[in-house]
Image (tube, coloured by chain):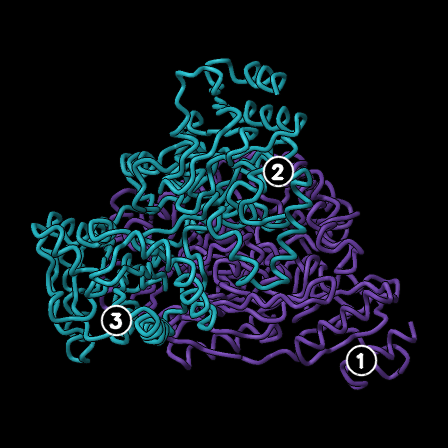
Chain colours: A purple, B cyan
Amino acid sequence: MITLLNDLRQIVGAPHVLTHEDPATDLSAWERDWRQRAHGRALAVVRPGSTAEVAAVVKACAAAGASIVPQGGNTGLVVGSVPDDSGTQVVLSLTRLNAVRDIDGANLTMTVEAGCVLQTLQETAEKAGFLFPLSLAAEGSCTIGGNLAANAGGTQVVRYGNARELCLGLEVVTAQGEVWHGLTGLRKDNTGYDLRDLFIGSEGTLGIITAATMKLYPLPAATLTAWAAVPSLETAVALLGLAHQHLGAGLTGFEVMGQFALSLVAKHFPQQRVPLWEDSPYCVLLENSDSESEAHARAQFERLLETAFENGVVSDAVVAESLQQAHQLWHIRESIPLAQAEEGLNIKHDISIPVSSIPAFCAETDALLEREIPGVRLVNFGHLGDGNLHYNVQAPADGDPKAFLREQEARVNTLVFDAVARFEGSISAEHGIGSLKVDKLPHYKDPVALALMRSIKQALDPQNLLNPGRVLTR
Amino acid sequence: MITLLNDLRQIVGAPHVLTHEDPATDLSAWERDWRQRAHGRALAVVRPGSTAEVAAVVKACAAAGASIVPQGGNTGLVVGSVPDDSGTQVVLSLTRLNAVRDIDGANLTMTVEAGCVLQTLQETAEKAGFLFPLSLAAEGSCTIGGNLAANAGGTQVVRYGNARELCLGLEVVTAQGEVWHGLTGLRKDNTGYDLRDLFIGSEGTLGIITAATMKLYPLPAATLTAWAAVPSLETAVALLGLAHQHLGAGLTGFEVMGQFALSLVAKHFPQQRVPLWEDSPYCVLLENSDSESEAHARAQFERLLETAFENGVVSDAVVAESLQQAHQLWHIRESIPLAQAEEGLNIKHDISIPVSSIPAFCAETDALLEREIPGVRLVNFGHLGDGNLHYNVQAPADGDPKAFLREQEARVNTLVFDAVARFEGSISAEHGIGSLKVDKLPHYKDPVALALMRSIKQALDPQNLLNPGRVLTR
């Protein structure tokens, strides 16, 4: 291992190889995951400054048989980017690869290195007069390489898709330390297998993404936000259908929030003044992005909401009058996780269900959980436009949250995941598998799919060097 | 082989196994490719009626070591769906698997079997009140399974993407005759590697697609078509930028047509009355799909064209006044291939280039070809919105088209493809590789990508049973 460390220092320069040899060096930022569920111990944290250095690092690790944990902003939610506790793994941090290599306005593309922070990309695009629509809670610190490795979702998926749909080309270092030069800004390229999408979402287990060519969109002329109270989840789904019909691709956000989730925001952040929640089981946040004007966006929203009232799909609604009001409404939505935390630990799920089945899924699963755990409280909210719910389970009001988590998590997960399976949903909509769900996957994934995944892993990384134990166990 | 034929008859029923044993049986429809470039000889044409039968056929072929050529509508343009002339391959025709299994309006999805004809799907969706946007010349006879295997493109890609972007889930029979049950209507599902996109575009070499869950869209309230004369390709690209900005996602079509291409339509189909072509090097066809109304779509078009006039980006333009006029304009665009054929055989290319580089690519490549082959005529047209050109090369006016094709095709291909490579384009934008370009691929594809593709083929189809010799040679 001493030889390996020397090799790594040769490749990236001694200041960019961090180890525990120096007792003053604190590697926690790289060794501990975002939600503090795991704290591993790395042999070294290596910070290459170029794609060629990444390739050389991989070759050196392969030669030494040391496995590699690629890492971006380390904001993942499934323990997929921190080392295990063996002290033998190399954390390969990509944050020094942070150049915007090119913006091609006429082609609506931007070529960026893996370590670029998502928010920087949003800002860079906007400065150039374009929209880069990927948007999620960790955008201030997550990196585009991590977003692609995890196929991140977020709030704009209903219109623009996941990270996958925003990517046209990749540069990837393979498990053999070769560089695939697959950066392309082409919308159409049928010359062989789709390697791009194989690496996207593979969580660093098949190759290391070092750069990407991403799509840009024209900046909308206006973006408006509305907040609607709906009598039921069924009507929330009906409102989604009406919104698709009325707004077309203008519909860029459609979030649903359950009454209990909003009550927690009202309780813990009373200054936020949550509208319309008290008389409605669910509220919906809608966003309309318009290529014409604010007046046009407003007229469209009004027509949509009028129709929705007439059909009994919406019981009350407000349209934000200013950008500030719009931000306030989004802020309420984004405060739900914080309000939950104030209420005490809970059991989190990131599931997806076909939109049409969401009402039945929730009715059945809510009832099941209430029967199994009397008094249980459900913090149900999420991206209804893409069928993605953060269906979180909170201890009864008089219960001890920590004990609840400890004693009920496994059982609740099984109850929820089994229900997800019955409704043909996914046990991980946007967060991925990592280590956290790797033991669950074989139970819920089609066995032929699992066998295909294993064949591919074996073919591309026969030494099992890249992020071993994530996505797939051996 | 007699045992295999008996097994196949057992599986699908004797009437669905067609062979040359009966001299009255004509297998040309399955053995000859669409453009009549190849006419192979099959051991048998097998027409299973269910996914289970497809799986059983694959197992029987694998046991006998007989390779399989999956086939849909057999309308591909790169000789990818007909047998070789060995008389040993089994053509597996999927046309009997033609059920629409499900339409889920609230989820905006449709689950269909591989053998469904594309136009049937468009009509089925429309009857249910939705748009299925994939649209291409062969839509009356191509199948969705073939569209997915080839990742078909067409005229709506600028808004809706290729076949790949329209697919959410697949059912696939593997090379081992196992069934992957991957039909899902989920917009978000991060539970492992993206097998779906690996099978899409793999041209039947990795697995056999038997069914798919496809996205539906709301039907637009109005679709308008405009025809604009532009002073140059540079201004055509500038017009595209303006159209993105003004129409946003309303821009559903953006086709460019060179003057010589339009002159051929005017010459051979004078009844079509091609507008504005005589004084312009290029014309552009634009389509605006609006979720609001025809009046709104028209006002938007007018604003766009006004701005374009003011900026000198457009020299003249017409907006279709009726659906009939719109069809006439599209019909002119679609008549270019037929007009070319009237003029005589030519050398066809299906290339893509980053949109921003298309003017420079055409200037350089036009000049190169004119220098190398004095008097050569360029039929340049295509889907400029996605950077996809059908850059076709026609014999000089006084030349013999057949001799030209015979003597110049290889040389012209090399000149054009080398130019494509210099501009970071693709030698196959939407048609695929098949047999036709399989020898070209190693020269133009990144060697690491090729090695990855070979590893994947080896891992998923180690016996090389599925469509051997397509996409990859051994």
Q: Is residue A349 above or below residue A1?
A: above
Residue under label 1: A17
Mark 1, other Cα within 10 Å: few <14 / some 14–19 / many ≥20: many
Give the mark nearest the N terminus, 1 or 2: 1
Q: Amino acid at mark 1?
A: Val
Left or right of B152 in this view: B11: right
Residue at horizontal 36%, vertical 34%?
A: B117
Is residue A57 in sight in this rendering? yes
Spot occupied by residue B290 in the image (x, y as percentages of width and height): 23, 55
The quadrant the N terminus of chain B occupies is top right
In front here: B371 or B289?
B371
Q: Distance from label 3 to label 1 (Cα)?
A: 51 Å
Q: Which labelled disc corresponds to residue A167?
A: none
Looking at the rendered image, the disc whose residue lies closer to the viewer, 3 or 1, is 3
Q: Chain of mark 2?
A: A
Q: Amino acid at mark 3?
A: Ala
Spot occupied by residue A17 in the image (x, y as percentages of width and height): 80, 80
Is residue A419 in sight in this rendering? no
Left or right of B4 in this view: A311: left
Residue under label 2: A370
Looking at the rendered image, the disc whose residue lies closer to the viewer, 3 or 2, is 3
Residue at horizontal 31%, vertical 61%?
A: B393
Q: Secondary structure at mark 1?
A: strand
Spot occupied by residue A1 in the image (x, y as percentages of width and height): 91, 71
Q: Chain of mark 3?
A: B
Q: Which labelled disc corresponds to residue B236?
A: 3
On the same chain, marks 1 and 2? The answer is yes
Q: Distance from label 3 to label 2 (Cα)?
A: 62 Å
Q: Distance from label 1 to label 2 (Cα)?
A: 52 Å
Mark 2, other Cα within 10 Å: few <14 / some 14–19 / many ≥20: some
